[in-house]
Image (cartoon, grey):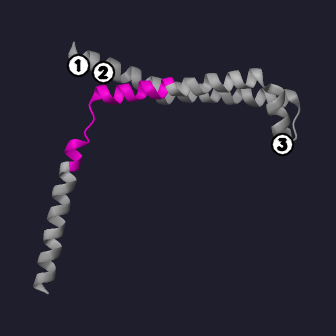
């Protein structure tokens, strides 16, 4: 029984040592988090541009494909895409650009 508890204790120590080493190596700097938010925003706006271009250039083809599953008029379809693009844009602003700007301001105030 004592050997069992010693093995469990030794295993826990090695796991905690391993985890503490992992935590130390995975700490992100403010600069790397800021760059991550910037790249997320760039990629998200790229997706938005592709969505917009695809919608503008192939609107009737997209409508034909979707009208098989959903019964809606062309006007409703256009409103739906417009609203989707607006919500997506607001999401990119709130979850990518705002944190990027905040980190930029905070880092600038700390540095300067």
Q: Which residue is mark 1?
A: 110
* Residue 106, above or below 80: above
* Secondary element type, mark 3: loop
For label 3, count other residues whose C-alpha is less than 10 Å away and answer few (under 14), some (14-19) or many (20+): few
Q: Is residue 66 left or right of residue 8?
A: right
Say whether disc 3 or disc 2 marks the residue closer to the N-terminus: 3
Q: Are marks 1 and 2 in contact (CB under 8 Å)?
A: yes
Q: Is residue 16 left or right of residue 53?
A: left
x, y percent for residue 99: 41, 27
Q: Which residue is mark 3?
A: 70
Q: CA distance from mark 1 to mark 2?
A: 6 Å
Quarter occupied by the C terminus:
top left
* Secondary element type, mark 1: helix
Q: Are marks 3 and 2 in contact (CB under 8 Å)?
A: no
Quarter occupied by the N terminus:
bottom left
Q: Is residue 1 left or right of residue 88?
A: left
* Residue 26, above or below 50: below
Q: Which picture quadrant has residue 65?
A: top right
Q: CA distance from mark 3 to mark 2?
A: 47 Å
Residue 106, numbered circle: 2
Q: Which picture quadrant has residue 11?
A: bottom left
Q: CA distance from mark 1 to mark 3?
A: 53 Å
Q: Residue at x 14, y 79 (%)?
A: 5
For label 2, count other residues whose C-alpha is less than 10 Å away and answer few (under 14), some (14-19) or many (20+): few
Q: Is residue 13 left or right of residue 74?
A: left
The magenta segment: 22-42
For label 1, count other residues whose C-alpha is less than 10 Å away and answer few (under 14), some (14-19) or many (20+): few
x, y percent for residue 17: 15, 56
């Amino acid at each position: 029984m004592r050997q069992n508890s010693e093995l469990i204790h030794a295993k826990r120590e090695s796991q905690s040592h391993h985890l503490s080493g992992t935590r130390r190596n995975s700490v992100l700097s403010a600069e790397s988090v800021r760059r991550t938010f910037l790249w997320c925003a760039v990629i998200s706006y790229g997706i938005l541009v592709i969505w917009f271009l695809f919608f503008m250039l192939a609107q009737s083809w997209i409508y034909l494909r979707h009208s098989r599953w959903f019964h809606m008029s062309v006007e409703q379809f256009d409103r739906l895409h417009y609203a989707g693009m607006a919500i997506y844009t607001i999401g990119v602003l709130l979850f990518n650009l705002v944190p990027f700007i905040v980190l930029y301001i905070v880092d600038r105030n700390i540095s300067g």
